[in-house]
Amino acid sequence: MLPDAAEEKITDITPALLHAMGVKALILDADNTLSGHASQIPFEGAVEWVARMQKEGFSAIVVSNNFKKRVEPFAAQFGLPFISMAMKPFPFGYLRAVRRMKSSRKQTVAIGDQVFTDILGARLTGVRSILLTPQGEESVLRFGWRRRLEQPIRRKIRERRIGEKWKGKNQNNE
Ligand SMILES: [Mg+2]
């Protein structure tokens, strides 16, 4: 259940890290990854980050379990294609995303804030994964129990310094 790497925010992910992981295509979660939960306002720097990744040659797509009504106008702000109602952690949405980006599973990374949807789904599908720290406000009623279940995994990530192996490889050419 562990991700391949862990970062605080999406904007902390560098092209160097992605190159070290051997990926060229990005599956991006929406809620608490690119914006606050159900918010149409992207996190500071998120739009610029996506544009920079595309300029560096990465493909990207927004894959969300949320409704089309939420995801479509949101993805449009990034100029990105999207898959809504993706039913993560089931692999269908991921596989569609890989196909649409004309990538392969090995060369694709899923980036998201939830262990039991974003990361579990990535593992089931066979794509790489980067876990983020959930950003912004969210309803404790809605996600509290899930976040508690995530705690041992987040602790393990810190203890084992998950993702450190990619760093130092070519992180200096930023
Ligand atoms: Mg999320």
Image: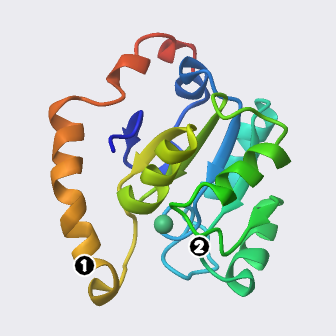
Q: Earlier in the sequence, mark 2 or mark 1?
A: 2
Q: Please identify the quarter of the rendering in which residue 69 is found.
A: bottom right
The image shows residue 1 at horizontal and vertical percentages of 33, 45
Q: Residues within 10 Å of mark 2 (few under 14, many from 20)?
A: many
Q: Position of residue 91 (x, y in %)?
A: 60, 54
Quarter of the figure with the C terminus: top right
Q: Amino acid at mark 2?
A: Asn
Image colouring: rainbow
Which residue is at 49% across, 41% downward? 129
- Find out if the beta carbon at label 1 lies less than 8 Å from the nearest ligand 1 atom: no
Quarter of the rendering containing residue 83: bottom right
- The answer to whether residue 118 is left or right of residue 30 is left
Quadrant in the picture for residue 65: bottom right
Which amino acid does the dot numbered 1 rest on? Gly
Q: Label 2: which residue?
A: 65
Residue 18 is labelled as none
* In the image, the residue with mark 2 has its CB under 8 Å from the nearest atom of ligand 1: no
Between the residue at mark 2 and the residue at mark 1, the CA separation in whole angstroms equals 18 Å
- Secondary structure under tag 2 reads loop
* Residue carrying label 1: 144
Where 83 sits versus 66, above or below?
A: above
Residue 1 drawn above or below residue 86: above
142 on left or right of 37: left
81 on left or right of 169 = right
**Which sits in the foreground, 45 or 164?**
164
Please, what secondary structure does the residue beneath circle 1 have? Answer: helix
> Residue at position x 15%, y 52% from top?
152
Comparing marks 2 and 1, which lies closer to the viewer?
Answer: 2
Residue at figure coordinates x 67%, y 83% from the top left: 67
Q: Position of residue 106 (x, y in %)?
A: 63, 28
